Amino acid sequence: MTISMYQASVPVYLQYLSSISAVLDKGAAFAEARKIDPATLLQTRLYPDMHPLVKQVQIFTDQAVRGASRLAGAEPPSFPDTETSFAELKARIDRAVAHVKSFKPEQIDGSETRDIVMKTPRGDMTFKGQQYLLGFSLPNFFFHATTTYSILRHVGVEVGKMDFMGGPPR
């Protein structure tokens, strides 16, 4: 049995968008319970040269939105990076979920060999769809999801692996 490009992308994006949203809930509750300014947590970094929590979530959601869009051959929408609270980050995740859910399997299946060209400040990056999903989009998506989780875990938020994963896939 083979796995389709849709199955390898959309359900994965949705599972982790949901789980990281729940992790952010725990981060907000942690800040409130300990009377920590939420802005302090949102600007926390694992290391000085890494992005803060807020930027990790922004990049994480961008990867899901752009990944699904590019696989479907659609122009990805741009989400402005203006969030300054846990509630705003959760609203951004909700927008990402709605966008990813808007794609149907027939829009993404068969994209294994679709040319995907990403414009970057360093020049164009060209991929085939499967290479883009497995070698670029999902690794970046998981890197920023993991870093979001790790920042909150590092400051003491009680989260574990199942919080990160969001439970078994459905």
Image (cartoon, rainbow, N blue to C red):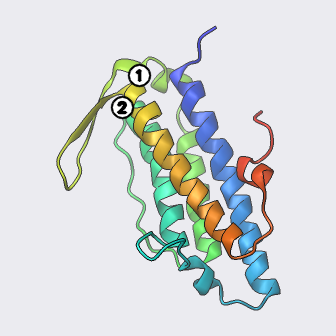
Q: Position of residue 164 (x, y in %)?
A: 71, 52
Res 34 → quadrant: bottom right
**Quarter containing the N terminus:** top right
Query: Which mark is first along the chain, 2 or 1?
Result: 2
The residue at 51%/74% (across/down) is 83
The residue at 77%/85% (across/down) is 32
Residue found farthest to the front: 47
Q: Is residue 22 above or below residue 34?
A: above
Label 2 crowding class (10 Å Cα cut-off): few <14, some 14-19, many 20+? some
The residue at 52%/34% (across/down) is 103
Instruction: Look at label 1 and name its amino acid.
Output: Ser
Residue 72 seen in render: no
Residue under numbered circle 2: 73
Callout 1: SS: helix
Callout 2: SS: loop
Q: Position of 42 compared to 49: left or right?
A: right
Is 138 or 68 nearer to us in this picture? Answer: 138
| Structural distance between the alpha carbons of marks 1 and 2 | 8 Å
Residue under numbered circle 1: 111
Of circles 1 and 2, the one toward us is 1
Instruction: Look at label 2 and name its amino acid.
Output: Gly
Q: Position of residue 71 (x, y in %)?
A: 41, 31
